[in-house]
């Protein structure tokens, strides 16, 4: 199934300078807003600074709105230097044209340079009237062998040292590795693990990097990425596998396969703790890594200027969140996801209401900003960049129908923080009751919806049987352009709720500046193949009646050049002809509704043993079980029983020797091998039924259909497709020829560039 970047274009004339009203030369500059040590791999944050000559609006009084962030299109191109590439490109579920490395959009971007070399970067900026400017900068990235010479590099192998850098310290045990790292206290250290080796049985405690100034962890030699274990999730931050300084240092992790024990398909196994935990200003880069089997990757940062970048990697098979970005305390926090897929296992169970600690609980990403006292921040705090980011959600604790509701594919929670800046280009978000959730309000803190500056450019949003709104936006200062929303014709699990591509509606109206800060959506398309029989009413917006937008509570809105295509409703909406057969490289992954097996709640009694009756232990059909039932489960290999103590979030697992489980004639006895449970302590027990899980409801699957898109454009003047103009591709209209524009205004900042 398919989608093409060709869905975002229509009509242009001549060139950039003749598009719109005819443009003038404008001034734009580049600022390096943050960077890692420029040793490969290196992360650099670049910010466009618009000067004179651009024609933008003004910020409404009392709002943080920055017109140059929203109303100018910025295009960054790596022009010279070693070739840019994404290792994950074949796996990113997005239009093939979007996977081009070295091309970035937006006012502030992050670039990761994998190889040493000299890179020339060009910035081109243009407003809706064709006023444009261009500038360049150069980034020089050094070879890591020069930064970590001789014994500053430690190579750890269980086999051989083929490919190890000359002069590096060579170790063959974890104890020797720990000692060698300790000997580098106060300096820089690079640890390289032998490719093709599995270190899960060898590394049994934290890799202590707290005394290092700059720490780099990667691989050497040929073969698959070395496997590094996660430690078991607990309440202690010392359980992270990579120990960082509490006073700030720099960490680079690359080319590693990092694994915990959580099995998202069967909802069993030990949850790996976050590989990092930081409380201060550590700069952290994960590049070309794979992370799986974990509770949450937490990028928490509580003080000082710092950044976190996940680049060209994969995150999957998590229990809680794929990644939780957390920006608080003083200083500016920058956060980026680049060329990566954060996707739950397509066969994962979908969680269980009120059992979020023991089942697949949340979606791929949640990012939020608070200050150090867990209250909203008024300072310049969070800068976020999503680039070629592919997110798929399958799991959630919220009640919905039969007890599951997939959490958003991406959730941006500013938690009342002012000056929250976000730029996203070329992303795919799939699944979730709200596929993309943008909010200021927090369910625990009750903070305000407050405005910021967020731009989403070229986003594909795919709903599922559970989806209501593809975008739920509660915050002013948010712009969408060139987005495609898609809803397949499948039975709706939560029927009877209106659906929309965009829903702009504040959850909290205490801050009037939020309602007065502009929101915009233009050049966007909603394709809904739902039939009226599936009981969904799709929102439309007057006057053009083809927008798929619901708005309530905002006073400054721009909705133009949007299209809604609904051919299967009783009253079809088909303003343009869409090619619904052309393959394009975007494939829905939703396999159908897959519910979970419930845990049993018990209460601690001051001993090391609890007893559970078979009437409490139900099979997937809701029937009481028996001794024979569980003996059959054990014979089939179901032995990953586990228990959670809600008081201290202590997890105990039978397969790790921490629990024993006896299936008696009339009940089940669960005993811990050491210690006792307190009187009144809340316990949750989940016995392994993974050989007899509830049947997946495949009637709601959307994994075998095509995404309708605009077909390629053979000649100018036909709706859909791209129109090449030299090396510039313009998309000033989407769906209508320019002469048919019902509103007669140029679309703002919709430009596609081919280097």
Image (spheres, rainbow, N blue to C red):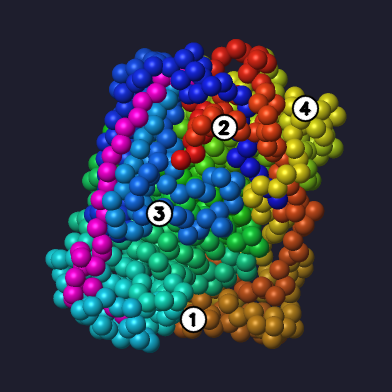
**Sequence order check, earlier mark of 2 and 3:** 3
Question: Could you tell me residue 454's position as x and y percent?
Answer: 44, 32
- In the shown orientation, is residue 587 left or right of residue 316? right
Q: Indicate the secondary structure of the residue bearing disc 3.
A: loop
Residue hosting label 2: 724
Residue hosting label 4: 574
The alpha-carbon separation of the residues under discs 4 and 2 comes to 26 Å
**Sequence order check, earlier mark of 4 and 1:** 4
**Sequence order check, earlier mark of 4 and 3:** 3
**Sequence order check, earlier mark of 4 and 2:** 4
Residue hosting label 1: 656
Q: Which residues are magenta?
A: 128-156
Question: Could you tell me residue 417's position as x and y percent?
Answer: 37, 34
The residue depicted at 52 percent of the width and 49 percent of the height is 99
- Please identify, in this view, whether the residue under mark 4 or under mark 2 is nearer the observer: 2
Q: Is residue 372 above or below residue 649?
A: above
Residues packed near mark 3 inside 10 Å, few (<14), some (14 to 19) or many (20 plus): some
């Amino acid at each position: 199934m398919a989608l093409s970047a060709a869905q975002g274009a229509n009509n242009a004339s001549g060139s950039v300078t003749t598009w719109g009203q005819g443009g003038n030369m404008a001034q734009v500059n580049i600022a390096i807003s943050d960077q890692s040590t420029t040793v490969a791999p290196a992360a650099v944050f670049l910010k466009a600074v618009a000067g004179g000559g651009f024609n933008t609006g003004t910020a409404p009084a009392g709002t943080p709105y920055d017109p140059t962030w929203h109303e100018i299109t910025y295009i960054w191109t790596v022009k010279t230097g070693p070739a840019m590439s994404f290792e994950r490109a074949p796996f990113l579920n997005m239009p093939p044209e979007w996977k081009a490395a070295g091309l970035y959009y937006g006012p502030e971007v992050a670039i990761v340079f994998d190889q040493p070399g000299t890179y020339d970067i060009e910035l081109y900026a243009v407003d809706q009237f064709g006023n444009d400017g261009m500038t360049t900068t150069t980034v020089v990235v050094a070879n890591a062998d020069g930064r970590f010479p001789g014994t500053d590099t430690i190579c750890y192998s269980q086999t051989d040292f083929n490919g190890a850098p000359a002069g590096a310290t060579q170790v063959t045990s974890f104890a020797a590795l720990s000692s060698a790292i300790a000997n580098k206290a106060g300096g820089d250290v690079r640890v390289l693990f032998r490719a093709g080796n599995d270190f899960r049985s060898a590394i049994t405690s934290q890799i202590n990097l707290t005394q290092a100034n700059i720490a780099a962890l990667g691989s050497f030699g040929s073969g698959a990425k070395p496997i590094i274990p996660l430690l078991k999730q607990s309440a202690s931050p010392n359980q992270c596998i990579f120990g960082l300084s509490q006073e700030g240092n720099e960490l680079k992790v690359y080319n590693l396969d990092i694994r915990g024990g959580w099995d998202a398909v069967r909802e069993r196994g030990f949850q790996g703790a976050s590989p990092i935990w930081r409380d201060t200003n550590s700069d952290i880069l994960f590049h070309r890594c794979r992370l799986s089997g974990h509770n949450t990757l937490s990028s928490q940062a509580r003080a000082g200027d710092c950044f976190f970048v996940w680049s060209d990697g994969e995150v999957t098979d998590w229990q809680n969140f794929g990644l939780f970005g957390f920006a608080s305390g003083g200083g500016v926090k920058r956060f980026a996801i680049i060329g990566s897929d954060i996707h739950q296992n397509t066969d994962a169970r979908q969680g269980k209401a009120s059992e979020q600690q023991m089942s697949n609980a949340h979606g791929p990403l949640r990012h939020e900003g608070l200050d150090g006292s867990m209250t909203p921040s008024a300072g310049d705090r969070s800068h976020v960049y999503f680039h070629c980011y592919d997110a798929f959600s399958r799991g959630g604790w919220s009640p919905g129908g039969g007890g599951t509701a997939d959490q958003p594919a991406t959730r941006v929670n500013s938690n009342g923080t002012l000056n929250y800046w976000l730029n996203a280009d070329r992303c795919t978000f799939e699944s979730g009751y709200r596929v993309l959730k943008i909010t200021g309000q927090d369910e625990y803190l009750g903070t305000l919806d407050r405005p910021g500056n967020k731009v989403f450019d070229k986003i594909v949003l795919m709903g599922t049987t559970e989806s209501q709104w593809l975008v739920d936006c509660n915050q002013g200062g948010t712009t969408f352009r060139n987005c495609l929303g898609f809803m397949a014709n499948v039975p709706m699990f939560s029927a009877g709720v209106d659906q929309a591509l965009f829903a702009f509606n504040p959850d909290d109206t205490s801050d009037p500046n939020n309602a007065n800060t502009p929101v915009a959506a233009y050049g966007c398309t909603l394709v809904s193949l739902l039939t009226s029989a599936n009981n969904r009413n799709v929102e439309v917006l007057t006057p053009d009646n083809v927008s798929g937008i619901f708005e309530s509570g905002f006073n400054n809105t721009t909705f133009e050049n949007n299209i809604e295509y609904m051919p299967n409703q009783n009253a079809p909406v088909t303003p343009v002809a869409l090619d619904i057969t052309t393959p394009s490289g975007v494939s829905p992954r939703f396999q159908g509704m897959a519910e979970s097996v419930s845990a049993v709640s018990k209460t601690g009694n001051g001993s090391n043993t609890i007893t559970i009756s078979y009437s409490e232990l139900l099979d997937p059909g809701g029937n009481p079980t028996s001794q024979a039932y569980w003996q059959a489960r054990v014979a089939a290999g179901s032995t990953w029983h586990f228990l959670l103590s809600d008081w201290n979030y202590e997890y105990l697992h039978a397969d790790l020797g921490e629990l024993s489980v006896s299936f008696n004639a009339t009940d089940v006895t669960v005993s811990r091998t050491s210690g006792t449970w307190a009187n009144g302590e809340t316990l949750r027990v989940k016995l392994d039924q993974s050989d007899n899980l509830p049947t997946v409801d495949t009637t709601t699957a959307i994994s075998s259909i095509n995404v309708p898109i605009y077909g390629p454009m053979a000649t100018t003047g036909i709706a859909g497709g791209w129109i090449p103009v030299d090396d510039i591709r313009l998309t000033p209209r989407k769906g209508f020829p320019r002469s048919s524009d019902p509103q007669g205004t140029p679309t703002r900042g919709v430009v596609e560039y081919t280097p």
